Image (cartoon, rainbow, N blue to C red):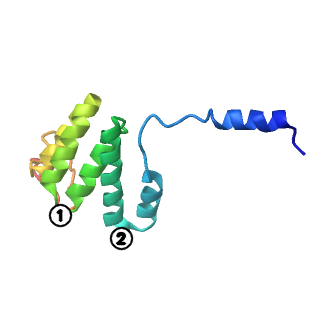
Amino acid sequence: MMRPTAIGALLLLAGCVPQSHYVWDKYDTSLYNFYKDPATASAYTEQLALVVHDGDAAGRTAPGVHAEYGYMLLTAGNGGGAIVQFEAEKRLWPESTVLMDRMIGLANGKPPTDGANIQPAATNQPVATGKPTS
């Protein structure tokens, strides 16, 4: 049988479990489910919307969450909503500016100018790179 001091120590240590600096909600579970079954994209996008909402409300949105939500909106054909999320990612995490500017360009239907062949998943159409084909 455990002594009262051991039980007290366990309770004290349980109270010291570090809390996440960011709001994640059920992000990990929904991402896992989405990877296992891409048909759950709609549920995953809804979960991302909750993570973004709760994170913004608490002022603790994790890096990349707005970008990921924007990407899911873009693949669903909601370019306007995607741009809003990409802009939010840039505002919260300025180090993402270069990538977010490229994603905003894709959402606006503009091909990348550096020759990269990036395709928006919503259309599965190749983006013109400006390079001649042989």
Instruction: Give the CA separation, mark 2 to mark 1.
Output: 17 Å
Q: Residue at x 37, y 36 (%)?
A: 60
In the rendered image, the quadrant that contains the C terminus is bottom left
Question: Looking at the image, which is closer to me, 19 or 2?
Answer: 2
Q: Position of residue 21 (x, y in %)?
A: 45, 34
Q: Residue at x 49, y 37 (%)?
A: 20
- Is residue 51 positioned above or below 32 on the image? above
Work out which residue is located at the far front of the displayed protein and give it. Answer: 4
Q: Is residue 118 visible?
A: yes
Q: Residue at x 18, y 39 (%)?
A: 87
Work out which residue is located at the far top of the displayed protein and give it. Answer: 94
**Which numbered disc covers residue 114?**
none
Q: Amino acid at mark 1?
A: Thr
Q: In the rendered structure, are the residues bearing label 2 and label 1 in contact, judged by CB atoms less than 8 Å apart?
A: no
Question: Looking at the image, which is closer to me, 68 or 114?
Answer: 68
Q: Is residue 121 visible?
A: no
Judge the density around disc 2: few (<14), some (14-19), many (≥20) Cα neighbours within 10 Å.
few
Q: Secondary structure at mark 1?
A: loop
Work out which residue is located at the far right of the displayed protein and give it. Answer: 1
Residue named by callout 2: 39
Work out which residue is located at the far bottom of the displayed protein and give it. Answer: 39
Task: Specify whether 120 is left or right of 1.
Answer: left
Q: Amino acid at mark 2?
A: Ala
Q: Position of residue 26 (x, y in %)?
A: 44, 53
Q: Position of residue 41 (x, y in %)?
A: 33, 64
Q: How many marks?
A: 2
**Which numbered disc covers residue 123?**
1
Task: Specify whether 69 is left or right of 31.
Answer: left
Q: Position of residue 38 (x, y in %)?
A: 37, 66
- N-term-proximal mark, 2 vs 1: 2
Q: Secondary structure at mark 2?
A: helix
